[in-house]
Amino acid sequence: MPFTLQLGDTAPDFTLRATDERTYALSDFTDDTLVICFTCNHCPYVVNSDETTRATVEKYRERGVRFVMINSNSANTYQEDDFPHMKQRMAEHQFPWVYLRDESQDTARAYGALRTPHFFVFNKERQLIYTGRAIDNPRDPNAATTRDLERALDDHLAEHAVSNPLTNPVGCNVKWDNQDPHWMPADACDLV
């Protein structure tokens, strides 16, 4: 069985605490389109592309698209990825998304998160229609040549099949608890 969710798979449920101190489940997000991104506090690919992600969230907010960010990184590997640092980061940057903590890493395993950032786009029925990167160069967004996430959202919102539904996420690997910082599960592999 592949490590990462396959196109057409249903979004796995979760119950996770957010930086606003509320607990959210998948069913709390009723928007027509749901984007779930596995992210963190420290990764340069995340940090450098935060404002690009913000612009995408704001561009699609009024079109029924909701963004949810999940930090599954082990705080034992990178202390700056712990919940207090998540709250501090949200307070400082006022990002326009819900930021959830996956302490057990069960949600990352259920989705098959490979890197930070790693985006998963689900339709109204919560079937996966796109997974991969937002842009091809999140470490230096000014050098990006493709906007894969926006293209997928545009296709979907125009009621077309997503033209390129699989791209490889670009970023740091998820930091798994009790593992070397660069370790990835044996069955984790590129998507394309």
Image (cartoon, grey):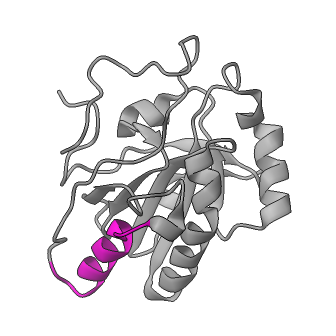
Q: In the drawing, does residue 158 fall left or right of residue 101?
A: left
Q: Quadrant of the C terminus?
A: top left
- The percent position of residue 112, horizontal first and vertical second, equals 35, 36
Q: Residue at x 38, y 59 (%)?
A: 136
Which is more toward the observer, 34 or 117?
A: 117
Quadrant in the rendering for residue 15: top right
Q: Position of residue 172 (x, y in %)?
A: 50, 37
Q: Is residue 79 visible?
A: yes
State which quarter of the image contains the N terminus. top left
Residue 103 within the segment the image draws in magenta: no
The correct choice, above or below, for 98 with respect to 73 in the image is below
**What is the magenta range?**
144-160
Name the residue: 57% across, 54% down: 69
Q: Using the rendered image of the protein, determine whether residue 29 is visible from the camera's viewpoint.
A: no
Residue at 16% of width from left, 81% of height from top? 160
Q: Is residue 57 above or below residue 80?
A: below
Q: Residue at x 19, y 52 (%)?
A: 7
Picture coordinates of residue 146 (x, y %)? Answer: 34, 69
